[in-house]
Image (cartoon, rainbow, N blue to C red):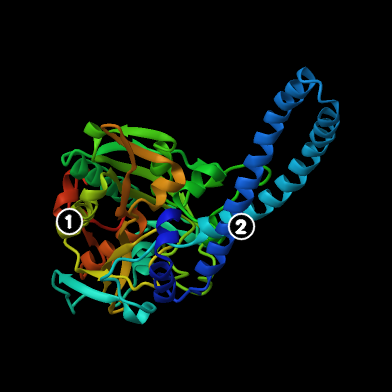
Amino acid sequence: MIDIKDLRARPDFYKRNLWKRGKDGNLIDELIKLDESWRVLKKEGDALRSRRNQISQDINLAKKQKRMDSVSELIKEAKEIPRKIKIQGEKFREIENKRLHLWKNLPNSVADDVPEGGEEKNKVLKKFGKISVKKSKKGHAEIMEDLDLIDTEKAAQIAGSRFYYLKNDLVKLNLSLINFAIDFLSKKNFIPIQTPYMLNKKALEGAITLDSFEEAIYKIEGEDLYLIGTAEHAINAYKSDETIGLKELPLKFVGFSTNFRKEAGSHGKDTKGIFRIHQFDKIEQFVFCKPENSWKEFDSVLKNSVEIYKALGIPFRTVLLSAGETSKTATKTIDLEGWYPSQKKYRELGSCSNCLDYQARRSNIRYQDGSKLEFVHTINNTAIATQRMMTCLTENYVQKDGSIKIPKVLQKYMGKKIIGKIRQK
């Protein structure tokens, strides 16, 4: 949620921001008009309520002074005021709802270095690791099926497409990735937290604009609950309507959750295996910080992810997203993309975003600095989305005999160095 006072002072800045995102900048004019009407109606309502409180005193005074004509006029006015308040209140609420809806759904301003345009304007920042041209042409799904590590056919029968059973050593690999990431980030003073898998609408809307995310998440029928699409939303909600002590900042969490997404609009894409699925596990970095430290913390969590990916030994790159590809809540997002030998291209594994005070305003999360109350800034980062990471590891670590070499940093968690075929008894 953007600062409405700043929008009133700099409407042209926010218009340019919308155009940069490929949106209609004239929405700013519409919001300003609604905001002006809202302020006028608010003053009118305040004046009517103030007059209602004052009029009884005026009647008593007129009676004491035996000004009976005045008393009659005041009583007549007193009877009219509730009707006027009701009519005025209906107008006010109508304008207020329109104003709030438009205001809450305006996207965050994008950073100056974010390129204007759509996906074609995404900018590759840096590449890491060496791409091998000698890997198997098999995709992760075929490799995993050959080793009896997944079963998507049975999952589709009992749950639907894009669900899965993890089996045998792939279960251990999943847990190894989770434990490795939590251990790695705990050493950097991140607080481990496991979140609820459901949030109510108020909590969810504190982290996102629901209109842009609602098609992607599951609603629980008949209840004010949604299955979470990421731990980010739940960790943000953990501090909603709270004031964080200055000494607590930066407050850093490493969150674990299972996440659920409809993957609406992705029909026919990545239907095999466990790359694009409805349920997945994720380790999330989330930071609450002072505004002046916002970009320092952004760089820090991005560095953590780069270190994790380097430790896992996959070829990957960082990509600055264009304005059109940046989510409504973020001012800047850098994706981390892993190399897939079977596809001969990089695919998204996670992202790092700075949301400035956008989420904090929506969720009313502040910090106390002396006598001042200020909104915090929030930074989120996918440390590891484990199912997707396993697909990348599988393709990059598959051996000539079809077995999968386990990255060195995971071997102590797995208790072995190779995932091979299960021996038949």
Instruction: Say which of 220 and 370 sits in front.
Output: 370
Q: Where does the N terminus fall, quadrant-wise?
A: bottom left
Foreground disc of the pair 1, 2 = 2
What residue did someone put label 2 on?
37
- Which percent across, then down, holds residue 231? 40, 46
Position in image of residue 91 (x %, y %): 71, 52
Query: In the rendered structure, which amino acid carries the disc numbered 2?
Result: Ser
Q: Is residue 280 above or below residue 225?
A: below
Q: Residues within 10 Å of mark 2 (few under 14, many from 20)?
A: some
Which label sits on residue 375?
none
Q: Residue at x 21, y 49 (%)?
A: 293
Q: Along the horizontal axis of the image, is 9 left or right of 392?
A: right
* Residue 267 horizontal/vertical position (percent): 53, 72
Q: CA distance from mark 1 to mark 2?
A: 47 Å
Residue 422, picture quadrant: bottom left
Q: Which residue is mark 1?
A: 303
Q: Can you say whether 383 is above or below 376 in the image?
A: below
Q: Nearer the viewer, residue 66 or 23?
A: 66
Direction from residue 386 to residue 44 in the image, left or right: right
Give coordinates of residue 320: x percent, y percent. 27, 70
Farthest residue, direction top: 64
**Residue pictured at 32% horizontal, 74% vertical:** 138
